[in-house]
Amino acid sequence: MKLGTCLYKNQIFVCIAQTDGVLIPALDPTFDHAAWRDMLVLIGSNTDLHALLDHASAAMHVAATDITLLAPIPRPRKNVMCLGLNYLEHAEETASQIGRTGKAPQYPIVFTKCPTSVTGHEADIPFDPDTCSQLDWEAELGVVLGKGGKKITRENALAHVFGYTVINDLSARDIQLNHKQYFLGKSLDGGCPMGPWIVTADEIADPQDLDITCRVNGVTKQASNTRNMIFDVASIIEWLSRGMTLEAGDVIATGTPSGVGFVREPPEYLLPGDVVECEVAGVGVLRNHIAQS
């Protein structure tokens, strides 16, 4: 099932993708409760999603042209947790850029993006050259937890996953260089496009066998597969939960493959007018436009 958050008649709803539009369960009075108006509430509610489809009514059906998709979780409760250098080829290309030998990290490299950076599919990404002139793309598989916990074992980790989405971990390379850390350069407004949907975990047989691609203006810049992650999804959840309680609705960006802009010769960065698409097979295509602030 593909679940999203949409704006319809100036109200925010949880919606379900259909071939001919979407279902908005809250439009049927029988289902008009908090879980169908807030994705985080739905994730924590243990609602039987497939049972709802058996009772879908005509009142729920809305044309795709009548809604505006937002990020599936428009405002996460906490920072989005992100993995750095989680594909060996990306670790190697990054290291070579600074004159070092790339190797797989022994432990996960974790940073975060603030909730205000999250934006949705087809949203314009602000471009303010006074703040950042080196905006880079990073296609990533996103993981949304459905069940929290602490000291989650790798063997049980995938049972804690609610679903998967696509994330573009947009990065302000000049800010990263100037500040010697990730957070500011990763947390620009609009710097975490997410969506278009959350695909429920039962639809993804193996999160470690998904093609992942990034295109800029139709030209492929990144092309890999999630099997090339250094730390797989289950291991990431295990590592994160060792000393920190994870919660339902937490979002994890699992790292980007090689092909980012700042390592190219010459370097390439996103500019106003560019269209960037991040795709994960079976999960979706996330498209955004770079706009002048």
Image (cartoon, rainbow, N blue to C red):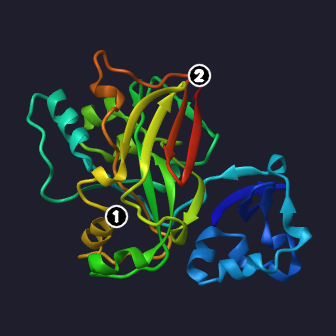
From the image, which quarter does the C terminus lie in?
A: top right
Whole-Å distance between the Cαs marked 2 and 1? 34 Å
Looking at the picture, which amino acid does disc 2 mark?
Gly
Marks 2,1: beta carbons within 8 A: no
Q: Where residue 167 appears, x then y in whole percent?
A: 48, 49
Please tell me in which quadrant of the rendered image residue 260 appears.
top left
Residue beneath disc 1: 233
Q: Is residue 1 left or right of residue 223?
A: right
Q: Where residue 146 appears, x then y in whole percent?
A: 49, 76
Q: Where residue 162 appears, x then y in whole percent?
A: 51, 72
From the image, which quarter does the N terminus lie in?
A: bottom right
Quick one: SS at disc 1? helix
- The correct choice, above or below, for 219 with respect to 201 in the image is above
Crowding at label 2, few (<14), some or many (≥20) Cα neighbours within 10 Å?
few
Q: Identify which residue is drawn at 88% across, 79% down.
A: 29
Pick the front one: 233 or 111:
233
Which label lies toward us, 2 or 1?
Answer: 1
- The correct choice, above or below, for 211 with respect to 125 in the image is below
Of the image marks 2 and 1, the number of the one nearer the N terminus = 1
Residue beneath disc 2: 273
Kindly give the residue lying farthest to the right in the view shown: 58
Visible in this render: residue 236?
Answer: yes
- The correct choice, above or below, for 261 with respect to 265 in the image is below
